[in-house]
Image (cartoon, rainbow, N blue to C red):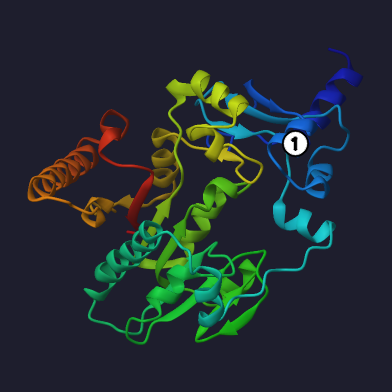
């Protein structure tokens, strides 16, 4: 390789992402999203596509790391920067009345999940016999639903951080869009980062931020959508057909596609301890008869046993059927 080829290769690598888990540069292509696919089948904004794909001949490349198997978008782009470039204003936080109107058709299961997450976190924290807890909703958007729910506990002070939200104080909750200002509010007793890390250019750094923002002994809830890397060929067909699990998960806003193994690897390498507390929505399922209630209770007990056993054996992947990509973690 001559000097010119070496320079072009270096510039090409600098213009693209490396693996967000192991920082590897070697990859194989999984799926190439063309300009037409993103515009016609995916329904993405043309202005946003033009910021990511500079010329129509280029593609949005989803690749597989040869070292650790991580699936990620290789193109280097930041949505908060793209929004500013095309002139989109930051989202204004909603008041409670606006929130109720905007989400009056919200799925009950989705609301119960968020309530359940906050309930468990507050139960862990309230064991300290303090009511002046400080809670961070990391990537909570203009809704900040987790912060709103946590704000009902005692004298909690709740903060929402999201780069695309306008800064404001709304009904006792502070919305911030600059991480430097969040650092001024530390330390936090608890943090919720729910379905956020799949959007981040550097999820390892964001986890480190969450770790450092917590006080020692503090708890966090971390969750991402998961893929099974054994099903990549099935996912490929689902993306083309526009249906199935992959069609919902693989899209322009997601740039990291974690497996359970890679997600737990990042969590542990950050320094967190995974605690044996599980988000289990089986308790919220409707039970039309007594027999089905018994079945759900048995399944819940098995899931709980499997979860604790996996932590004890450090064998998350082997027992992945017992839990999804959500964990309560503790900063030692």
Q: Which residue is mark 1?
A: 40
Q: Residue at x 54, y 46 (%)?
A: 198
Q: Is residue 221 visible?
A: yes
On the question of residue 211 being in view, the answer is: no
Q: Residues within 10 Å of mark 1 (few under 14, many from 20)?
A: few
Element assignment for label 1: helix
- In the rendered view, does 291 fall on the left or right side of 92? left
Task: Identify which residue is drawn at 42% across, 43% down.
Answer: 269
Question: Taking 269 as reference, is 237 left or right?
Answer: right
Q: Which quadrant of the figure has residue 121?
A: bottom left
Most extreme residue toward the top, as rendered?
1
- Residue 148: percent from left, percent from top: 44, 76
Q: Which of 38/221 is in front?
A: 38
Give whichever of 99, 323 is nearer the camera.
99
Q: Is residue 115 above or below residue 61?
A: below
Image position, residue 30 (x, y; %)? 61, 22
Residue at 24% from the left image edge and 50% from the top image edge? 282
């Amino acid at each position: 390789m001559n000097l010119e080829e070496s320079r072009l290769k270096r510039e090409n690598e600098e213009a693209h992402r490396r693996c967000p888990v192991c920082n590897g540069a070697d990859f194989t292509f999984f799926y190439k999203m063309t300009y037409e696919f993103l515009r016609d089948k995916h329904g993405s904004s043309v202005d946003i596509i033009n910021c990511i794909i500079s010329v129509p001949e280029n593609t949005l490349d989803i690749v597989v790391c040869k070292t650790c198997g991580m699936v990620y978008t290789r193109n280097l782009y930041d949505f908060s920067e793209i929004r500013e470039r095309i002139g989109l204003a930051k989202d204004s936080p909603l008041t409670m009345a606006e929130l109720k109107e905007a989400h009056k058709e919200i799925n009950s299961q989705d609301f119960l999940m968020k309530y359940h997450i906050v309930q468990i976190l507050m139960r862990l924290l309230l064991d300290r016999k303090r009511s002046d807890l400080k809670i961070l909703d990391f990537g909570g958007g203009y809704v900040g639903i987790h912060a709103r729910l946590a704000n009902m506990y005692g004298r909690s002070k709740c903060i929402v951080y999201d780069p695309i939200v306008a800064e404001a104080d709304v009904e006792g909750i502070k919305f911030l869009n600059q991480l430097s200002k969040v650092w001024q509010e530390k330390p936090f007793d608890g943090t919720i980062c729910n379905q956020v890390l799949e959007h981040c250019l550097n999820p390892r750094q964001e986890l480190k931020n969450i770790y450092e923002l917590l006080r020692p002994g503090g708890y966090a809830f971390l969750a991402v959508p998961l893929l099974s890397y054994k099903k990549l060929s099935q996912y490929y067909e689902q993306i083309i057909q526009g249906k199935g699990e992959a069609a919902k998960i693989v899209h322009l806003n997601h740039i990291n596609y974690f497996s359970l193994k890679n997600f737990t690897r990042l969590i542990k390498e950050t320094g967190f301890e995974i605690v044996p507390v599980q988000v289990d929505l089986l308790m919220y399922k409707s039970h039309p008869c007594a027999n089905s209630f018994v079945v759900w209770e048995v399944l819940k007990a098995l899931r709980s046993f499997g979860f604790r056993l996996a932590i004890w054996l450090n064998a998350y992947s082997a027992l992945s059927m017992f839990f999804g990509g959500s964990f309560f973690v503790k900063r030692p």
